[in-house]
Image (cartoon, rainbow, N blue to C red):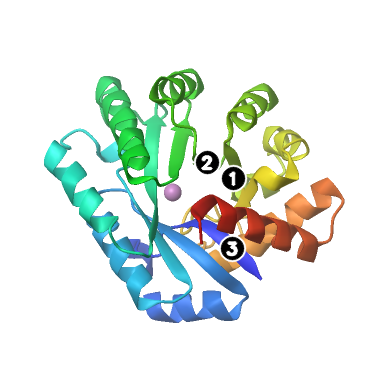
């Protein structure tokens, strides 16, 4: 039984067959998954989707690509959405300096503001950090609230160790299965076992051996297999460890 801690089943790429995919995911042994909001619209949909399926939970929040026109009213809306018992985190939030779709000052402002929201609500948060490691660390430290996970972690061993010492969890997605995923594999070999989460980030980041296909949460087992191999554990052991970690992190 697997816990996919980061998926986007609300994505338009599932519009044709969403319910069939959700059923397939559950039948494949994924008995828990968190659907992640990326803007105001998907946060609403995410919260709704979680109410419709027992094994689905939701995170609400605004991705750095989408923060340019955010308002305090939107923060109020997120707060209301988080009233639902099935909303278990704020996310995904963070910084993306690879695409720079929104001005960096706005990205930083709303990253910090949404961490504060998580703190206010007593929820964990999910961080997207692409090519923005230094500023991500700076804002996390500035917030003083460390109940978070770095999703699809792409930083160094040193950064991972600093985050773990602060209390963070580290999540791995498809890239850890890639042949050129050497850095992620190095980090995966050293993360304390009680801080590892697994995810698909579907429909993106499809793991080996399915690269090129649409990703969905059933493929989280390939991430689990890779981590099990790296750590010298059975796949079942790694599935159980990441299940327990995920439940603890999200309070499920
Ligand atoms: Ni994502």
Residue 200 quadrant: bottom right
Q: Residues within 10 Å of mark 2 (few under 14, many from 20)?
A: many
For the residues carrying marks 1 and 2, which lies nearer the camera in this image?
2
Q: Look at the image and tell me in which quarter the N terminus lies.
A: bottom right
Determine which residue is flagged by label 3. Answer: 3
Q: Position of residue 164 (x, y in %)?
A: 63, 32
Q: Nearer the viewer, residue 177 or 221?
A: 221
| Residue at the spot 32% in from the left edge and 40% down from the top edge | 120
Label 1: element kind = strand
Q: Position of residue 11 (x, y in %)?
A: 35, 61
Q: Position of residue 126 (x, y in %)?
A: 45, 43
Q: Is residue 164 left or right of residue 81?
A: right
| Residue at the spot 34% in from the left edge and 53% down from the top edge | 37
Residue 165 quadrant: top right
Return the disc, 1 or 2, that comes first in the chain's sequence: 2
Determine which residue is flagged by label 1. Answer: 171
| Residue at the spot 57% in from the left edge and 72% down from the top edge | 31
Residue 149: which numbered mark, if any? 2
Q: CA distance from mark 1 to mark 2?
A: 7 Å
Callouts 1 and 3 close, C-beta under 8 Å: no
User: How many numbered discs sit on the rendered protein?
Assistant: 3
Q: Position of residue 35 (x, y in %)?
A: 41, 60
**Is 187 situated above or below 52?**
above
Callouts 2 and 3 close, C-beta under 8 Å: no
| Residue at the spot 71% in from the left edge and 34% down from the top edge | 187
Q: Nearer the viewer, residue 171 or 130?
A: 171
Q: Is residue 98 left or right of residue 154?
A: left
Return the disc, 2 or 3, that comes first in the chain's sequence: 3
């Amino acid at each position: 039984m697997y816990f996919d801690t980061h998926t986007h089943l609300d994505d338009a790429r599932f519009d044709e067959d969403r319910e069939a995919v959700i059923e397939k995911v559950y039948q494949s042994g994924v008995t828990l998954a968190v659907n992640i909001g990326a803007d105001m619209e998907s946060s609403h949909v995410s919260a709704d989707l979680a109410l419709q399926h027992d094994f689905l939970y939701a995170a609400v929040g605004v991705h750095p690509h989408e923060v340019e026109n955010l308002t305090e009213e939107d923060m109020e809306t997120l707060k209301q959405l988080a009233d639902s018992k099935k909303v278990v985190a704020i996310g995904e939030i963070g910084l993306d300096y690879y695409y720079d779709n929104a001005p960096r000052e706005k990205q930083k402002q709303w990253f910090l503001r949404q961490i504060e929201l998580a703190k206010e609500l007593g929820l964990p948060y999910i961080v997207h950090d692409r090519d923005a490691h230094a500023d991500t660390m700076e804002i996390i430290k500035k917030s003083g609230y460390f109940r978070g996970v770095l999703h699809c972690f792409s930083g160094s061993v040193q950064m991972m160790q600093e985050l773990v010492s602060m209390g963070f969890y580290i999540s791995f997605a498809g890239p850890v299965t890639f042949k050129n995923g050497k850095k992620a594999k190095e980090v995966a070999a050293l993360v304390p076992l009680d801080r590892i989460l697994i995810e698909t980030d579907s429909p993106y980041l499809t793991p080996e051996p399915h690269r090129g296909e649409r990703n969905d949460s059933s493929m989280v087992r390939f991430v689990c297999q890779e981590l099990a191999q790296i750590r010298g554990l059975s796949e079942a052991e790694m599935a159980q460890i990441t299940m327990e970690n995920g439940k603890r992190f999200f309070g499920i």
